[in-house]
Amino acid sequence: MSAAEGLAPGLYVVATPIGNLGDLTVRAADVLARADLILAEDTRVTGKLLAHSGSKVPLRRHDDHSSDDERARVVAMLGDKAVALVSDAGTPLISDPGYRLVRDARAAGRTIHTLPGPCAAIAALTLAGLPTDRFLFIGFLPAKAKARADAIAEVAGLRATVLLYESGPRLAATLAALAQGLGDREAAVAREITKLHEECVSGSLSDLARRYANSPPKGEIVIVVGPPAEQAEASDDELDQALDEALKDRSPSRAAAEVAERLGVPRKRAYARALERSQ
Ligand code: SAM
């Protein structure tokens, strides 16, 4: 136990508000008030949050560029002190520092607690009205056009909603690059989430690129891109042909699973057909 008020030693990964201070969880406020030390990406930014929540806990700067020695000192401290890790806003480690510290703390067998809370990507997903069953967060795209196009090409084949962070001045160019690399999918631009000027604008990628081309928006932004349009489901003939080929050297269930994945048809349909074809 730490000397103060009984917070168990270890690392506390604490999510903080992404705009509205009312989103600081009760548990986060409690840990930020009782930890022995708070590690922050920018001590001035976190200082304001602590002033709001009434915490007097000492602050120290820490990020993924902190030296190996500094990280080792923090990991050693976790044996008998309660240390909280925060970033400027949202969930630490999500396009923010903290990964190296958590990795090293875990390797050293230290206790790690997470205090979940605001995360701009997840908040945007809940606003966008786009499919939520499969999604991929890709953080910030590279700034240079070629690297950006390559990063987009990497995710083009996925049947998933894609989430990314972007800034106002680059928004229109990124939307246009997404339209080019992914096709003109449905998308949404979620801006200033939980703040006074929160908005979420839906449209096709090309419409959104045009909308913002001459008026780069202010504030913080998440782009949400829907999955590729559903293709027409394979016909019985196409399915039979694929199954006959797969059944040559696979069991009906294996053949059905592989063909279902490849043709994007329900497994049940492929399996029923595979059983018939294998008799
Ligand atoms: N760790 C944070 C999180 O959990 O969301 C993200 C940190 S990342 C350095 C900052 C980026 O997150 C911003 O540039 C913006 O793209 C996005 N972001 C943060 N707050 C936001 C908000 N209130 N509305 C929209 N996007 C936001």
Image: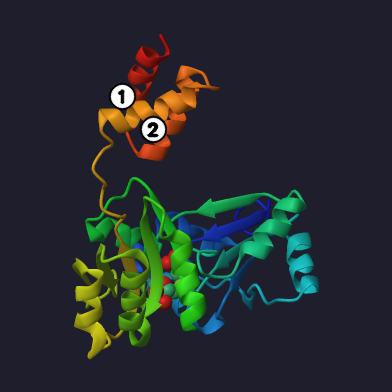
Query: Residue 60 location in percent, x, y?
Result: 64, 76
**Identity of the residue drawn at 39% across and 32% down:** 260
- Give the percent coordinates (x, y) of residue 26: 41, 56
The answer to whether residue 267 shows anywhere in this view is no
Where is residue 93, by image quadrant? Answer: bottom right
Figure check: 116 above or below 216: above
Q: Is residue 257 visible?
A: yes
Q: Which residue is mark 1?
A: 269
The disc, 1 or 2, on the residue closer to the chain's N-terminal end is 2
Query: Which residue sits at x=46%, y=20%?
Result: 253
Determine contact: label 1, label 2, CB under 8 Å: yes
Badge 2 amino acid: Ala
Q: Judging from the image, what secondary structure is the residue with disc 2 in?
A: helix
Give above or below for 279 relative to 6. Answer: above
Judged left or right of residue 97, residue 279 is left
For label 1, being within 8 Å of ligand 1 is answered: no
Which label belongs to residue 260?
Answer: 2
x and y, in percent, of residue 42 in the image: 55, 80
* Horizontal and vertical percent position of residue 225: 31, 62
Q: Residue furthest top?
A: 279
Would you say 274 lies left or right of 42 here?
A: left
Residue 17 sits in which quadrant?
bottom left
Q: Residue at x 38, y 63 (%)?
A: 163
Residue at 56% x, 81% y is 43
